[in-house]
Image (cartoon, rainbow, N blue to C red):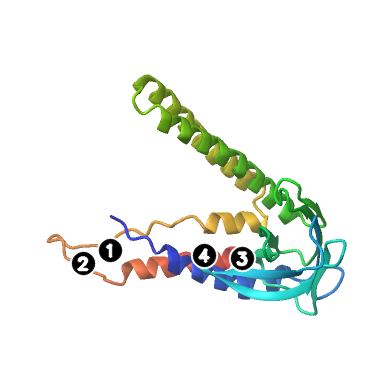
Amino acid sequence: MKPRYYGLLILSIVLIISTGYINKTGTDKKGKGHEIKITIQHVKDSLCYLYHHFGDKQRAVDTVPLDASGRCVFTGDEPLSGGIYIVYIPNKVYFEIMVNEQFFSLETDTGDFIGKMKITGSVENKIFNDYQKYRKVQYNKSQALKKRLDNNKNNPDSTKIIEDLMKKVGTETEKYTLDLIENNKDAFFVKVLKMTKPIDIPGPPKDANGNIIDSNFALQRMLTAISLIQILL
């Protein structure tokens, strides 16, 4: 089996994104720094937290109050590192946003953070939100089919039909993702999406007797992949 250096590679990618990409795209025409305006319906007089996904952890970035109208602003003199962030309100459902543009506004509702999201000034978040909406629909389809499959375990004909429908959902999702990547090649979210897929690292070369010739082969291939990512960014 080919080794999969998934965790280490993703951590390295996040470090690259956080330290490199923002230097090329982090400055908005409005000026340096960042200003992200958030409005959340049906919640008020609370604290709103901003976290940055960092490897397999979340790093606290900022905390601001939500006013009586559910509005808050994350602002600062320095641009934020590009990546996926979490907006969190205590005792409420959190939601994720993309940060690449540094000045934009989001409005949503506690009843459906993803479905009711309104975005101003961020192409990246529009792409990200459309992706989230589609994946949510497909997930719900899969869960409904899984429930039907569990209820028809003793019916081979029905099982086959349901399994084919589940495969169709998977195929549709894969096609949607590939089309999204093809149609938005320059989008930062697409770069992140492509990077989060596990990368297969081929096994090391061996001699005629099956002995490993170069024990550092896989690591070198992984480092080469990271170097290519740096070039892309």
**Quick one: label 4, few (<14), some, or many (20+) residues within 10 Å?**
few
Residue topped by disc 3: 233
Picture layout, residue 160 above or below residue 209:
above
Residue topped by disc 1: 204
Residue 171 shows in the view: yes
Proximity of marks 4 and 3: CB atoms separated by less than 8 Å: no
Residue 35 shows in the view: no
**Quick one: label 3, few (<14), some, or many (20+) residues within 10 Å?**
some
Give the left or right position of residue 153, taking residue 90 as reference: left
Q: Please tell me which of labels 4 and 3 falls first in the chain.
A: 4
How far from the left and from the top, in percent, is residue 1? 28, 55
Q: CA distance from mark 4 to mark 2?
A: 26 Å
Residue for point 67% across, 72% down: 81
Give the left or right position of residue 115, taking residue 152 as reference: right
Q: Please tell me which of labels 2 and 1 falls first in the chain.
A: 1
Residue topped by disc 2: 212
Proximity of marks 2 and 1: CB atoms separated by less than 8 Å: yes
Provide the secondary structure element on which disc 3 rests: loop
Foreground residue among 48 and 164: 48
Q: CA distance from mark 1 to mark 3?
A: 28 Å
Provide the secondary structure element on which disc 2 rests: loop
Residue topped by disc 4: 228
Q: Please tell me which of labels 4 and 2 falls first in the chain.
A: 2
